[in-house]
Amino acid sequence: MKILVINAGSSSLKYQLFDMTDESVLCKGNCERIGVGDSFIGYKNAKGQEKKVEVEMNDHTEAFMQVKKMLTDSEVGVISDLSEIDAVGHRVVQGGAVFHQSSLVTPATLEQIDALSPLAPLHNPGAVQGIKAAQSVFGEHTPMVSVFDTAFHATMPEKAYMYAVPYEYYEKYGVRRYGFHGTSHRYVSGQLAELLGKDIKDTKLITCHIGNGSSITAIDGGEVIDTSMGLTPLDGFMMGTRSGSLDPSVVTYIMEKEDLSAKEMDSILNKKSGLLGISGVSSDDRDVSAAEAAGNERAALAHQMLYYQIAKTVGSYFVALGGCDGICFTAGLGEHQSGLRKAVMDYLNAIGVKCDDERNDNVHDTALISADDSKIPVYVIPTNEELVIARDTKSIVEAM
C-alpha cells in the first residue's frame, strides 16, 4: 500500500510518499509561498535525486498538480500514475473535543474541522484547503484520512484540561486545554517504551518535544494525563517566538500601557516573544547560541530561562505521574542541542537523573544519554510524525 502524507498550511504544503510494505519513504518535498507569489516546489526521492522548480501556485489545488508532476516525473518520479497511491493522510492541528482519534474524511468530518478553525485560525483553514484540493486532484475514489495533533491528548482528565475561568466559557466556546504535537508524543512514547523493554501500559513516561514550538507531555500507561500546551500552542514554556505561560495581567497591563488591540497583543506573544524577545537576536537557537558564545548576556539569559522552564515542567510531571520510568528528548532542539539536554538534566539531579556527558555529546540517532547509575533513563529519540499519520491512514483504510 502506498500512502501520501500531507501537512498543509495556509501558504505551504509538505508531502511524503510511503510504501507501507516496509514503511519506507519513497520521496518527500514541499510547496512554498502558495498564493503569495514567487512560489516553488522542492522534491527528493529515496535515491537522493533532488529537484526544485519555481512555478506559480495560486492555490492548494495547483500545488497538488505540481506534486503530481513531481511524483510521476520521467526522471525523478517514483510512480507512473496517481492511481498507484492508495490513500492520503492529512495532518490536522485542532480536533477539539470532537475528534479523539484519526478519522476517515467525509463531508461531515470536513465541516467539523472547518468549524474548529476559531481554535486554530492559522492551521485548520489550511488543512481544509489541503483536503479539498487533494479531493479535487485525486477524485472521490481515493480515501482521505485526517490525523489530529490534539487526539493523543484526549485522555487528559478534567482536572488537567480545565481552566479556572467561569465554566460558561468552556460550555460556550470550548475554552480548555487541548495540547498539541500529539502525533510526535505518541510516536516517541511508543519508541521509549520499547527501549525500556516494557509494555507501554506498564510505564510512566515524560516526552519532551523541543523545537521552535515546544511541548512536554506526561504519559501514564500509554495515556496522556497532562501536557504543557493549552487552548493554543502558546501555552507552556517559552519557545522560539512564543512567550509560553505568564501572569494574565502581564497581557492586560502591556495592552493598556501600549494601547494595543487584542490582535496586536496576540502577535507580540506569538511572534515577538520567547528566545527572540529575550535575546533580541533571533528565534533560531543556532543564532542565539552563537551570540551567547560571543558574550551576549541577553542571549545567555534566554537560554537560562528556557532550560529552567523545561526542567520545572518535567519536574512537575514527575509529581503528577507519581514517578517516572523514562524521559526522552525529541524534535529540532531536543535531538540536536546537547547543551540544552545537559542543562535540563543537571536540574533534574534532584529526582535522580544523571547525564553521561560523552553519550550526550555524541548523539547521531536514537541514543541513551543518561549515566548507568541514573535513577531515570533518558533518551534522545528522533520523532516521525509523518509515519504515525501513514500508519493511522493504513489502519483506517484497511478497516473500510
Image (cartoon, grey):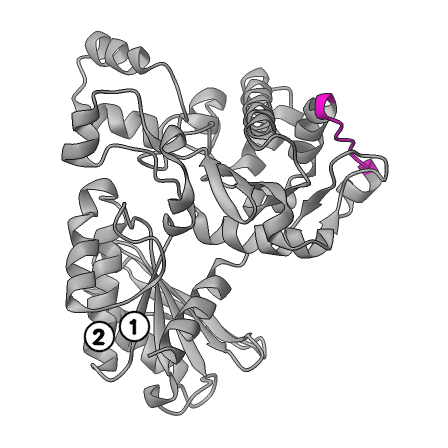
Give the residue displayed 26% in from the left and 58% down from the top. Answer: 127
User: Are the residues at dot 2 and dot 1 in contact (C-beta closer than 8 Å)?
Assistant: yes
Within the image, what quadrant is residue 272 found in?
A: top left
Q: Does 211 sit left or right of 362 as displayed?
A: left
Q: Does 12 sit left or right of 110 as displayed?
A: right
Give the residue displayed 15% in from the left and 67% down from the top. Answer: 107
Q: Does 18 sit left or right of 221 as displayed?
A: left
Percent x, y of residue 241:
41, 32
- Label 2: how many Cα within 10 Å (few below 14, some 14–19, many 20+): some
Going from the N terminus, do you reach mark 2 or mark 1 first?
2
In the rendered image, which residue does mark 1 sit on?
Answer: 144
Disc number placed over residue 357 in the picture, else none: none
Q: In which quarter of the image is the C terminus?
A: bottom left
In the rendered image, which residue does mark 2 sit on?
Answer: 135
Let me know if residue 354 is in the magenta part. Answer: yes
Percent x, y of residue 114:
17, 54
Within the image, what quadrant is residue 5 found in?
A: bottom left
Amino acid residing under circle 2: Gln
Give the residue displayed 30% in from the left and 55% down from the top. Answer: 9
- Element at badge 2? helix
Percent x, y of residue 99:
29, 54
Q: In this view, does 268 lie above or below 370?
A: above
Q: Quadrant of the N terminus?
A: bottom left
- Label 1: how many Cα within 10 Å (few below 14, some 14–19, many 20+): many
Q: How many marks?
A: 2
Q: What's the magenta region?
A: 350-357
**Nearer to me, 132 or 282:** 132
Within the image, what quadrant is residue 172 found in?
A: top left
Let me know if residue 217 is in the magenta part. Answer: no
